[in-house]
Amino acid sequence: MGIQELLSQYGDKYIQALFVTWKLTAVSFVLAFLIGILITIMRVCPVKPLRWVGDFYVQIFRNIPGATLLIMLVYALPYLNVVLSYYVCVLTATSLLPAAFCSEYLMAGMNTVSIGQIEAARALGMSFGKILKNVVIPQALRSSVLPMTNLLVATMLTTALASQVPMNPTDLTGLVSHINTRAVGGVTAFLISAVLYCATAVVIGQIGNLIDRKVRVLR
């Protein structure tokens, strides 16, 4: 089946699948970002048990395969009488995994903040929370724009996990499976999805570069 034939039959479904992928990406990234900030704060706080929990989270979710996590959410949780929709399971997996990398990027950004600024904040009587809120985290975020841009692209690619469960409507990768089970889409079906993934990634990269140039901390 050629590109024109595929687009004529499934063009509307590709557009729908693209929007599903965008929605999953946006929601997953926002959740991962918020969780990542929380985990990062735990990893640098003075309370040792919280630091252990933060480090444990990163070590677990940085190293677990996405498919494994999704299988656990879909098939293992029901044995604990916890039944989640396929959408929630996919969203959970695509949020928890990037959150670990988000925390790592924020930690790297924090390392760019000079110790002198922190000591000056302490001299002014700022508490730990205020130092993080007003001094450390804002600069860490400005230093982490490009890594966060890469994380957003990686999160978009991670949403392909949705193809492993019968979601409706489906994402771009799931649509390829849908087409190939009903017609001979072959490699062409993958090619169209790949082009849409790449086009989205390029736009994300350009926006990230623009933001980085505007907020970059000059040293």
Image (cartoon, rainbow, N blue to C red):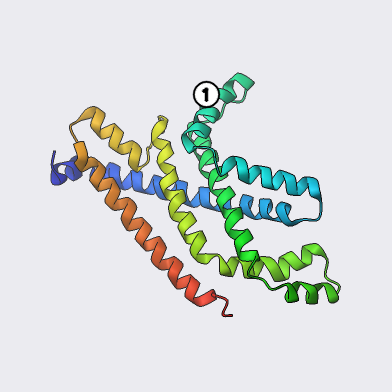
Q: Is residue 136 above or below residue 193?
A: below
Inspect the image, locate mark 1, and give the three-letter code of the amino acid beneath it: Tyr
The residue positioned 19% from the left and 40% from the top of the image is 9
- Residue 189 horizontal side relative to residue 146, left or right: left
Furthest-bottom residue in view? 219
Asked where in the image residue 45 lies, by quadrant, the reply is: bottom right
Q: Is residue 7 above or below residue 135?
A: above
**Residue 122 position in % (x across, y down):** 83, 72
**Residue 137 position in % (x across, y down):** 67, 65
Of helix, strand and loop, which one carries label 1?
helix
- Residue 129 horizontal side relative to residue 196, left or right: right
The residue positioned 34% from the left and 40% from the top of the image is 173
Q: Between 154 and 182, which is closer to the camera in this rendering?
A: 154
The residue positioned 44% from the left and 70% from the top of the image is 209
Furthest-top residue in view? 79
Q: Which residue is mark 1?
A: 75
Q: Between 209 and 118, which is closer to the camera in this rendering?
A: 118
**Residue 98 position in % (x across, y down):** 53, 48
What quarter of the picture does the N terminus occupy? top left
What quarter of the picture does the C terminus occupy? bottom right
The residue positioned 65% from the left and 69% from the top of the image is 138
**Residue 196 position in % (x across, y down):** 30, 52
- Residue 106 horizontal side relative to residue 54, left or right: left
